[in-house]
Image (cartoon, grey):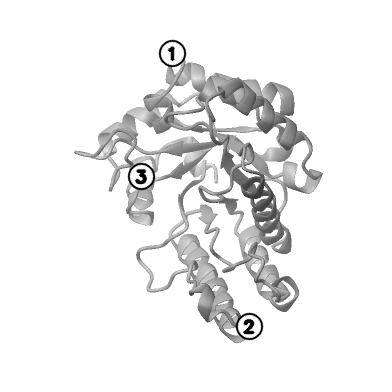
């Protein structure tokens, strides 16, 4: 079991998601920001290594304007050696990497412009992982998308569009259940037609399910993963105290987390903590499960 966190390290004084306003676009500025982001990413990974954190989600904002029409700079070639160096570090230290496109990447959108932009954005994410020379265990997770007043039609549209994607995109894509539109059962329906692996978000499952217990949900989603995909990925969080339903906690609830670990002892998976204090909660979680043989097997 590898435990990780997404995108930002709060213990370091850098961000790998720096950007700038479109009106200030220039090749010189772009080069400076990309270099800064890549250097910061490597620093985050070095921090993770020092702290035995072997799972990390790379920010989608690593390359500003990567899928925008204004982009006329061949960043892939210019920074090829930087990406290679980062990839070598990841592989040498046996780290697991994912990426998660933002809310405007919607494969089943009824808006053709949104759909076409989504394809460009997926291609960008694949390029990042390919430039690092990471294998198909490095995944890009997306949500199914909108319901658009007809859930079954929207599911069918997702299936059709997924099946039309290039193989280099399909080999990296995974879908995640959400808290209000597409639950695990909906994702399983898509899997049957596409064989796309499913990420189980346990907090979303608590918010929206079809009556499956956590153990039943694990048995179902585990079957969607194949050897080339690596071990299954799980997202974990809990309800923010005093927040609206669906709001992620600011820091880990160790009692809740300990119960979750006990309830999933029969399963081996990589765990992404989607908790707002990032690596701080990961370090607390790792300390709690230091005697769990799944964790120490890494």
Residue 106 in picture, x, y percent from top left: 59, 43
Residue 282 in picture, x, y percent from top left: 38, 50
The image quarter containing residue 203 is top left
From this view, report whether residue 186 is shown above or below residue 122.
above
| Label 1 vs 3, first from the N-terminus | 1
Q: Nearer the viewer, mark 3 or mark 2?
A: 2
What residue is rendered at 72% in x and 78% in y?
Answer: 78
Residue 253 in picture, x, y percent from top left: 27, 39
| Label 2 vs 1, first from the N-terminus | 2
Q: Nearer the viewer, mark 2 or mark 1?
A: 2
The span from disc 2 to disc 1 (Cα, nearest Å) is 53 Å
Residue position marked by numbered label 2 in the rendering: 27
The span from disc 3 to disc 2 (Cα, nearest Å) is 42 Å
Residue position marked by numbered label 1 in the rendering: 211
Residue position marked by numbered label 3 in the rendering: 285
The span from disc 1 to disc 3 (Cα, nearest Å) is 28 Å
């Amino acid at each position: 079991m590898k435990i990780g966190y997404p995108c930002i390290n709060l213990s370091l004084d850098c961000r790998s998601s720096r950007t700038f306003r479109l009106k200030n676009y220039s090749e010189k500025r772009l080069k400076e920001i990309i270099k800064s982001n890549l250097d910061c990413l490597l620093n985050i990974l070095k921090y993770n290594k020092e702290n035995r954190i072997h799972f990390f989600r790379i920010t989608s904002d690593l390359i500003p304007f990567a899928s925008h029409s204004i982009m006329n700079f061949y960043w892939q070639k210019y920074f090829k050696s930087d990406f290679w160096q980062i990839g070598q570090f990841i592989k040498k230290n046996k780290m697991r990497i994912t990426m998660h496109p933002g809310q405007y990447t919607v494969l089943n959108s009824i808006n053709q412009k949104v759909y076409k932009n989504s394809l460009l954005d997926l291609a960008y994410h694949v390029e990042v992982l390919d430039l690092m020379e990471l294998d198909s265990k490095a995944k890009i997770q997306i949500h199914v998308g909108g319901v658009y007043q007809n859930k079954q039609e929207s599911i069918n549209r997702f299936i059709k569009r997924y099946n039309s994607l290039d193989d280099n995109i399909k080999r990296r894509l995974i879908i995640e259940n959400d808290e209000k539109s597409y639950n695990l059962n909906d994702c399983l329906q898509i899997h049957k037609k596409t064989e796309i692996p499913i990420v189980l978000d346990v907090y979303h499952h608590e918010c929206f399910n079809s009556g499956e217990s956590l153990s039943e949900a694990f048995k179902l989603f585990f079957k969607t993963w194949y050897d080339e995909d690596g071990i299954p990925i799980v997202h974990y969080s809990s309800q923010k105290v005093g927040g609206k339903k669906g709001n992620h906690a600011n820091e880990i609830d160790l009692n809740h987390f300990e119960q979750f670990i006990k309830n999933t002892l029969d399963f081996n998976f990589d765990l992404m903590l989607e908790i707002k204090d990032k690596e701080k909660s990961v370090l607390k979680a790792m300390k709690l499960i230091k005697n769990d043989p799944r964790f120490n097997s890494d």
